[in-house]
Amino acid sequence: MPIQQLSHTLMPAADYNIVLIGYRGAGKTSVARELSARLGWPWYDSDTEIERAAGKSIAEIFATGGEAVFRDWESRVIEQLGVRRGVIIATGGGAILRAENRAMLTRAGRFVWLQADPETIHARLQADATTAARRPNLTRLGELEEIRTLLAEREPIYAALAELRLNADANTAAELAETIAAALTRSTTTEAT
């Protein structure tokens, strides 16, 4: 995909949020950081906010309460982030599973789906030393098979929400952020005319 350079680096604060969705390992946190630098908007990683609110790691939440307790924490954090405006939110891969999370994020969210192949995601997770310690597997399937299975279940939801879909396999976080910023600049200019 061609990458367009912006003539400016900061956009004025908006009455919407940029919500990055996609499977873990797709690059949402890295893209959020890069996009924040370009737009001058604050960014939040929902998993980091969950750990901050819970006072423990995601692995500890899973160990003591299971996935259901983690998803409850996730919904609380999504609710807090969803009422803000002019922020970038890097969601957890399964944050879109609950209807109430989707509703909260949709109120002010412009969704960008970072798409990556299961093999790319698997390789990235294997290369990230913190992944195993921070996030447990969600099924008893092998790592790659779990990614394929969960991605197939989640893709229809990602597709229904996404205003913009980007190939996270072939582009760097900086390139993806540049593309998002350019797309938003074009759509904001179009809406204003």
Image (cartoon, rainbow, N blue to C red):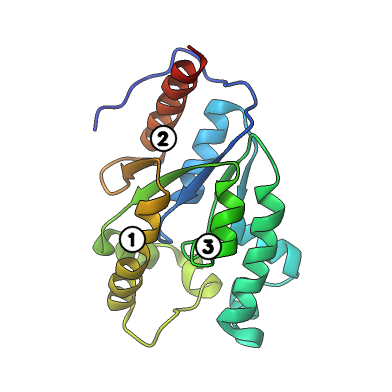
The answer to which image quadrant residue 173 occupies is: top left
Secondary element at tag 1? helix
Q: Is residue 171 left or right of residue 77?
A: left
Secondary structure state at the residue bearing disc 3: loop
Alpha-carbon span between mark 2 and mark 3: 24 Å
Does the rendering let one see residue 68? Answer: yes
Q: Which mark is residue 135?
A: none
Circle 1: residue type: Glu
Q: Which residue is mark 2?
A: 174
Is 184 located above or below residue 21 in the figure?
A: above
Image coordinates for residue 151, horizontal then vertical, percent:
33, 66
Q: Residue at x 35, y 40 (%)?
A: 172
Mark 3, residue position = 95
- Mark 2 against mark 3, which lies toward the viewer? 3
Q: Amino acid at mark 2?
A: Ala
Q: Amino acid at mark 3?
A: Ala
Task: Give how far across and how far down residue 85 sits, in percent.
Answer: 67, 37
Q: Residues within 10 Å of mark 3 (few under 14, many from 20)?
A: many
Please count the marks in the image: 3
Q: CA distance from mark 3 to mark 1?
A: 13 Å
- Nearer the observer: mark 1 or 2; the answer is 1
Sequence-first disc among 3 and 1: 3
- The residue pinned by badge 1 equals 155
**Position above or below: 113 against 178:** below
